Amino acid sequence: MSIARLQKETLTNLPFYEERVDLACAFRWTARLNMHEAVANHFSLAVKDDGTRFLMNPNQAHFSRIKASDLLLIDANDPETLNGPNAPDPTAWGLHGAIHRNVSHARCVMHVHSIHATVLASLADSRLPPIDQNCATFFNRHVVDESYGGLAFEEEGERCSALLADPKNKVMVMGNHGVLVVGDSVADAFNRMFYFERAAETYIKALWTGQPLRVLSDEIAEKTARELDDYPGQAERHLSELKAILDDEEPVYRN
């Protein structure tokens, strides 16, 4: 057996290999979109039915370099997590550990300080009005955290996780901080994060004009959001296309 084939078989035998590949793709594409925060910010993916065992990026690794084999496998109920040699970032543990421990429907959790979502989080009113189709996607489907209390250590993580108890809330605008998105899979969460940043950019740039906003009625906004909720296969296709591009341009992400 060739060394290359042996290496490939060893990799594909990693626990949750395909999930790792999806998550590694999301990290690298987030860096390409300039939505990363140097060696900060975190993504996680539950790999146990109750959500308490999850994959997450290693401490202070740049999103653009993360590979499938780099991802940590963490137990949200293990109090010794921060004492191990491969301990995650303490704020990642505080925020993502609490969410995976308390919010079983949050299978994938993505937290970034992307520019436009963070500008939105810095406004006195951080709600996203339905001024276009992308913005309408999130009508009645995002929650604003009004009580920023400092870095997301365990106490802050527990507080934030309570805001996601309603399964309808898929996006948390973290006031004075950034944004956190949850989904049923890596594809679902990444697609939602991408479009929330696009929606926030549209809204912020519309505010720049100083002109009155053309806001959709609640009825049409809700109808649009429901139609997009049910739109078949887009998130999965989005991630599949991104993996295909990375397979051509930087296949090392699968290692």
Image: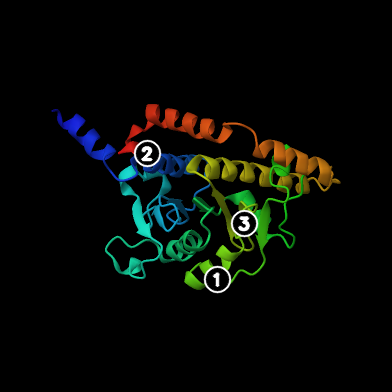
Residue lying at 51% horizontally and 61% vertically, measured from the top left? 99
Examine the rendering and report whether any part of residue 139 can be seen.
yes
Q: Residue flagged by tag 3: what amino acid is it?
A: Met
Furthest-front residue in this view? 49
Q: Earlier in the sequence, mark 1 or mark 3?
A: 1
Front label number (2 vs 3):
2
Residue lying at 38% horizontally and 29% vertically, measured from the top left? 247
Q: Secondary structure at mark 1?
A: loop
Q: Residue flagged by tag 2: what amino acid is it?
A: Glu
Packing grade of label 3 (10 A; few <14, some 14-19, many >=20) is many
Name above or below for residue 244 compared with residue 118.
Answer: above
Packing grade of label 1 (10 A; few <14, some 14-19, many >=20) is few
Nearest the eye: 114 or 242: 242
Q: Secondary structure at mark 2?
A: helix
Q: Residue flagged by tag 1: what amino acid is it?
A: Gly
Give the percent coordinates (x, y) of residue 98. Answer: 48, 64
Q: In which image quadrant can residue 5 be found?
A: top left
Disc 2 marks which residue?
18
Disc 3 marks which residue?
172
Disc 1 marks which residue?
150
What quarter of the picture does the N terminus occupy?
top left
